[in-house]
Amino acid sequence: MGTKLVGGPEDTLNSGRRMPLLATGTATYPFPPADDIKRAVLDAVEVGYRHFDTAALYQSEEGVGLAIAEALERKVIKSRDEVFITTKLWCNNATPERVLPALRESLRKLKLEYVDLYLIHFPVRLKEHILDMTCEKDDILPLDLKSTWEAMEEVYKLGLAKSIGVSNFTCKKLADLLSHAKIPPAVNQVEMHPVWQQKKLREFCKEKGIQISAYSPLGAKEWGFDLVLSNPTIIDIARAKGKSVAQIALRWGHEQGVCLIPKSFNKGRLTENFAILDWQLTEEELQKIGEIPQKRIATIPEFIFPDGMFKSPEEFWDGEM
Ligand code: A2P
């Protein structure tokens, strides 16, 4: 009712740009062929999604690029600015002189002149040859956040990224970044769902004008976790409302005002995940979800080594566990 269906609801970022709040994620492993990603993104465009989330890490930029090119050619979308594309700087390029070349490479794969949002993927720098999460203790190098962010500000000024932001940043790391950033991050993309509600981080970001994007909004089901979709509180609410369990988890996230990035390469589930706009949760249901015991699922053990830079998940997440 009054809700724009194509693209769904949007929010204005601190950069002044509009960002659709229902996005499609493209991270999956093993990396699928570009054609599979292209088909999933084209399905998502047909369903109404206009925000696509990719990353150098996911090796999905090429597939997203093929899909956007074909959607334009088939006139399913009329112009480039009808879609919002987020991509991310991988940790091997998290050093000032490598930011611009890394973004240019992403743009080449995406066949785009600019991305709508460019994020520092993790507050971590890795050796140049590390292209994914598989690394040894000595592959983790100190990240110079100040100079790396300055390089992010440069790509913003060049117009190659219309907004810039970060991912997997804690309140502590955001505070550090804000203490020297000339252009504040527009977005912090983090794990968020009913089992990891990020109350403290959301309050902090709200106060600072940083939009939250929620990855793994179904509880990282893609990575084999089932804590959200098997949660009894959410299952009960879903039954009572005649909605799916995934829809309850997503609607909860939507009502918190964040951008949601569920990954689905199935058109039926893409449709289901978009159908969360014309109904709402009651106060009582929101309260019950608010009482769900909390647990961070994506602790990122790949970067934790007992004798390395991050010795424990607590250290990696600055105690914000
Ligand atoms: P598929 O791509 O086959 O739809 P998350 O982003 O939290 O990791 O969740 C994504 C995972 O959840 C993917 O494995 C995806 O599989 C699955 N998924 C996406 N939408 C739904 C849904 N509505 N119901 C159940 N599973 C879903």
Image (tube, rainbow, N blue to C red):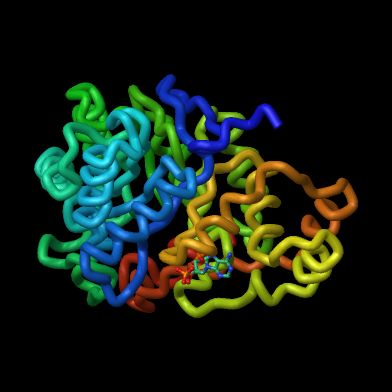
Residue in the image at 33% along x and 41% along y: 85
- Quarter of the image with the N terminus is top right
Residue 69 is left or right of residue 233, and the answer is: left
Q: Which picture quadrant has residue 147?
A: top left
Q: Residue furthest front?
A: 74
Residue 243 is left or right of residue 50, and the answer is: right
Residue 47 locus on image (x, y percent): 48, 49
Residue 258 locus on image (x, y percent): 58, 42
Can residue 116 be seen here? The reply is yes
Residue 108 locus on image (x, y percent): 11, 45
Asked if residue 244 is positioned above or below residue 110 in the image, the reply reads: below
Asked if residue 223 is positioned above or below residue 164 in the image, the reply reads: below
Residue in the image at 20% along x and 34% along y: 151
Residue in the image at 58% along x and 64% along y: 218
Residue 12 locus on image (x, y percent): 50, 25
Residue 167 is left or right of residue 212, and the answer is: left
Asked if residue 57 is positioned above or below residue 182 in the image, the reply reads: below
- Quarter of the image with the C terminus is bottom right
Q: Camera-side residue: 245 or 189?
A: 245
Can residue 96 be seen here? The reply is no
Q: Camera-side residue: 213 or 48?
A: 48
Q: Which picture quadrant has residue 81?
A: top left
Residue 318 is left or right of residue 321, and the answer is: left
Residue in the image at 86% along x and 64% along y: 240
